[in-house]
Image (spheres, rainbow, N blue to C red):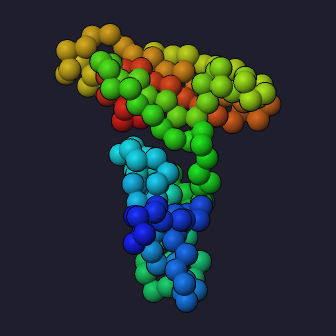
Amino acid sequence: MAGDGLPLKTDAGFAVPVPQSTEPWLYAVGDVNGLAPTTHMGVYQARIASNAILSFIKGNRLPVKINIPIGGSMAKSKPSERTFPQVIFTEPNIATVGHTLMSAKATGLKVRTVDSEFSIPGAWLYGDGQPGWARWVIEEGTEKLVGATFCCVEGSEF
């Protein structure tokens, strides 16, 4: 929290505007920015902030060697009220991010769902012989993934 007890304001890459500074150097992820005080959201924000930091270093050709992980992206994400991951810590966990089928339709999106069995590798170690399930909500025409729900052992990890 800022000195006045308010959350720190950030840009889309979670950089905090600092007076008299032209370069981003302070980033606020997790509870301190007041967006969503959950561990899973903090991890999500940290990924966005790290991409922003790496993009800045690469774009300004600073003397730091960067090896982008395979499958990594240097793009900035834009926080949205629909991107907040949520978890219900039941057995098994129920985890969601983005739209559900109902919320997508309520906002006027034309979507379809893909349902499948789903479980983490080694779920049998927990004594759970039943597979979980996943639902993917996909926008028709663009094929863009707009939401996902997981119900499985340790589904919160997704």
For the N terminus, give its image quadrant: bottom left
Residue in view at x 48 percent, y 38 percent: 85
Residue in view at x 26 percent, y 25 percent: 122
Residue in view at x 35 percent, y 46 percent: 39
Residue 105 coordinates in the image, percent (x, y): 72, 23
Residue 155 coordinates in the image, percent (x, y): 37, 28
Residue most toward the top?
Answer: 130
Residue most toward the bottom?
Answer: 20
* Whether residue 114 is situated above or below residue 48 in the rendered picture: above
Decide which of 93, 152 is in the foreground and name it: 93
**Residue 94, located in which quarter of the rendered image?**
top left
Q: Is residue 54 visible?
A: no
Q: Is residue 21 left or right of residue 29?
A: right
Residue 45 coordinates in the image, percent (x, y): 46, 54
Residue in view at x 49 percent, y 21 percent: 134
* Whether residue 146 is situated above or below residue 80 in the rendered picture: above
**Residue 125, located in which quarter of the rendered image?**
top left
For the C terminus, give its image quadrant: top left
Residue 106 coordinates in the image, percent (x, y): 72, 24
